[in-house]
Image (cartoon, rainbow, N blue to C red):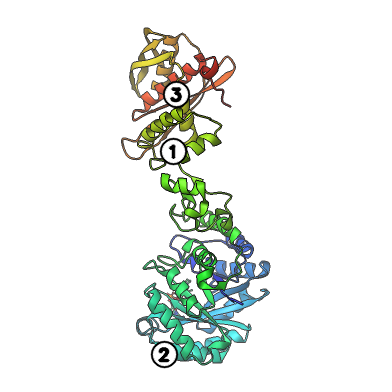
Amino acid sequence: MPKKIEIFDTTLRDGEQTPGISLNVKEKLEIARQLEKLSVDVIEAGFPIASNGDFNAVKAIAENVKGPVITGLARANFKDIDRAAEALKAAERPRIHTFIASSPIHMKYKLKMTEEQVLEAAVAAVKRAKSFVEDVEFSAEDASRSDVEFLCRLFSAAIKAGATVINIPDTVGYTTPGEFGQLIKTIIEKVPEIDKVKVSVHCHDDLGMAVANSLEAVIYGATQVECAVNGLGERAGNAALEEIVMALDTRKDFYQVEHGINTKQIYRTSKMVSTITGIFIQPNKAIVGANAFAHESGIHQHGVLTEKSTYEIMTPQSIGLTTNTLVLGKHSGRHAFAERLKEMGYELSQDELNKAFERFKDLADRKKEISDLDIEAIVEDQVMKLPQHIELECFQVSTGNKAIATATVRVNVNGKVIEEASTGDGPIDAIYKALERACNMNCKLVDYSIRSVTAGKDALGEVTVRVEKDGRTFLGRGLSIDIIEASAMAYTNAMNKTMWNNGYSKPREVD
Ligand SMILES: CC(=O)SCCNC(=O)CCNC(=O)[C@H](O)C(C)(C)COP(=O)(O)OP(=O)(O)OC[C@H]1O[C@@H](n2cnc3c(N)ncnc32)[C@H](O)[C@@H]1OP(=O)(O)O
Ligand SMILES: CC(C)C(=O)C(=O)O
């Protein structure tokens, strides 16, 4: 039987130590309930001595969340341990997690204690915790910068005092995979009582190696990994739960271990934690980032369309997503473009497809992402060659906060050049009225929206309008670095559509 790795989630304790996060009881309980659905083995619900709020949160989780072990952190002193025990009273499976630092730096400067004093405090703390609960975890803070002989002595004493789990933290994210693997191996070889307990690791990401270090520890015998959703935690954070789990899952052939996580709840958990904590997930974040299952480049899109496993090592469904996404942008190719056209219901000849693709590439050079509306515009305007009854030749607008907005337009309507002017409530209203006069047309503007589609001061503005004419609605779009020009182009585009009638020239109605 492959050995099982227990997942100890510390999102609600170390994760909450992320600068800027403070969770109330209700929020912690909501996350804990989701962690239960995710099937984590242990929930570290908080640090009960830290505040009344944290005490109440640990208590509420202990009372309401059944299934996982519920633990609370305590320094190696009776006050912290007694408070943790009190908070955990109602837990179905309580664990007290007590810790003390073991590195020369921490002992000398922070604790001002000798090795022997630390060892004594650790033993007393474990015994005190044991007087309340059966399950006691002991952590040697800053273990990776500690003297290995002392560390082994400390763990040995903690186990003799009753610890059921010994935790080896890389508190400051200092170690490397090779070094950390050897440390785990040494501890397992040198602590005689080690086979009585679970061996845990708790890695921080200061050098970006928290996940790699944790996984290396698994190879060398660790049976519990402490981690946090989205990699939250003090400073650069903890090992990311979703990365640990999906690495063990996807590379089961390599790690040869099992876990009990319901991976289909990963995406939902990540989203919930991000929403509640307000900590945004970077798009290229492994597993749960917006781009983790998105393909933008043509060669990759072609591969994925033919066979997903060419560029996907795990399925989006395995983390609870419904599908992958093919993002259309400047690096995309014909295969993905054709596929999107097919999904949108367009059937183009090879020649039409080539023309549309050329236009698409041209637009993609200027836009961050190409939407379905863009594709629709390309197909209608370029491939189907809808006739342009109205062409906007030029315009001029004068406006100001103390002046009446006035616009002059010159349009070519079916070969006839017409100039008109109008005032309005602002420059856009003025230009729209002038356009209506010039074209002798009465439309009702029902919706106007503007957004930037590229970055920077010279960003392209995209204006989308919906106009109503004779009880029907028509969509118009305009793109320019000048937002008034984009607005005028969008209105002209919509007015053109009101004039098309047969076959491909039939105006497309929109909701
Ligand atoms: C590596 C980690 O993530 S450990 C967890 C870190 N998390 C937190 O600190 C979050 C919650 N912390 C808190 O709310 C507060 O720090 C408290 C309530 C725990 C303590 O607050 P204060 O009493 O004001 O002490 P303060 O935080 O300033 O200093 C820490 C004290 O604990 C001592 N201490 C630190 N670790 C331990 C330990 N494991 N065992 C015993 N004492 C410890 C320090 O030596 C210092 O003692 P001193 O007050 O006698 O100098
Ligand atoms: C309390 C311990 C496990 C810790 O958070 C650390 O060392 O980083």
Q: Amino acid at mark 2?
A: Phe
The answer for how far apart the CA atoms under marks 3 and 2 are is 76 Å
Q: What residue is shown at x 45% (from left), y 84% (from top)?
A: 185
Q: Secondary structure at mark 3?
A: helix
Quadrant for the N terminus in the image: bottom right
Coordinates of residue 309 in the picture (x, y in percent): 51, 55
Q: Quadrant of residue 356?
A: top left
The image's mark for residue 334 is: 1
Give the residue at the far front of this rendering: 350
Where does ligand 1 appear, by image quarter? bottom left
Residue 464 percent location from the top left of the image: 46, 28
* Residue denoted by label 2: 150
Give the residue drawn at x 53%, y 58%: 314
Q: Say if 314 sits above or below 332 in the image.
A: below
Assess mark 2: CB under 8 A from ligand 1?
no
Image location (x, y in percent) of residue 153: 46, 91
Mark 3 near mark 2, Cβ–Cβ under 8 Å?
no
- Amino acid tagged 1: Arg
Dot 1 beta carbon under 8 Å from ligand 2: no
Element type at mark 1 = helix
The residue beneath circle 3 is: 381
